């Protein structure tokens, strides 16, 4: 799988500090489930805004 454990500094669950995180072989941080869900929510909002700008009302 070529995964590596490394230290990431940031905030999680209202705690700031150093966290052990997984990285892939190209140095990309693997997202936690909550981070991935938030990223997808933002992506969906951007796509919905683009549809509205084109005169299409997306389904909820």
Image (spheres, helix red, strand yellow):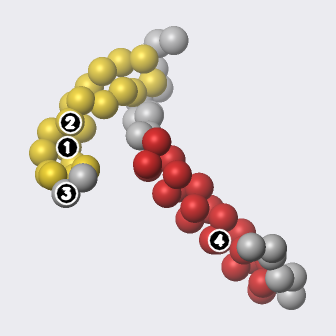
Relative to residue 3, is residue 55 depicted above or below? below
Q: Residue at x 86, y 87 (%)?
A: 55
Q: Residues within 10 Å of mark 3 (few under 14, many from 20)?
A: few
Q: Classify the position of the C terminus by image quarter.
A: bottom right
Q: Nearer the viewer, mark 3 or mark 4?
A: 3
Q: Nearer the viewer, mark 1 or mark 3?
A: 3
Q: Position of residue 23 (x, y in %)?
A: 39, 27
Q: Earlier in the sequence, mark 2 or mark 1?
A: 1
Disc 2: which residue: 19
Disc 1: which residue: 9
Q: Earlier in the sequence, mark 1 or mark 3?
A: 1
Instruction: Give the farthest residue toward the top.
Output: 1
Q: Earlier in the sequence, mark 2 or mark 3?
A: 3
State how far apart marks 2 and 3 are (Cα).
13 Å
Q: Position of residue 57 (x, y in %)?
A: 83, 82
Q: Is residue 13 left or right of residue 23?
A: left
State how far apart marks 4 and 1 are (Cα).
28 Å
Q: Residue at x 70, y 79 (%)?
A: 49
Disc 4: which residue: 46
Callout 2–callout 3 Cβ contact below 8 Å:
no
Callout 2–callout 1 Cβ contact below 8 Å:
yes
């Amino acid at each position: 799988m070529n995964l590596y454990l490394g230290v990431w500094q940031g905030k999680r669950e209202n705690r700031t500090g150093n966290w052990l995180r997984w990285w892939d072989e190209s140095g990309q941080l693997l997202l936690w489930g909550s981070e991935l869900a938030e990223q997808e929510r933002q992506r969906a909002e951007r796509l919905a805004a683009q549809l509205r700008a084109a005169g299409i009302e997306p389904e909820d």
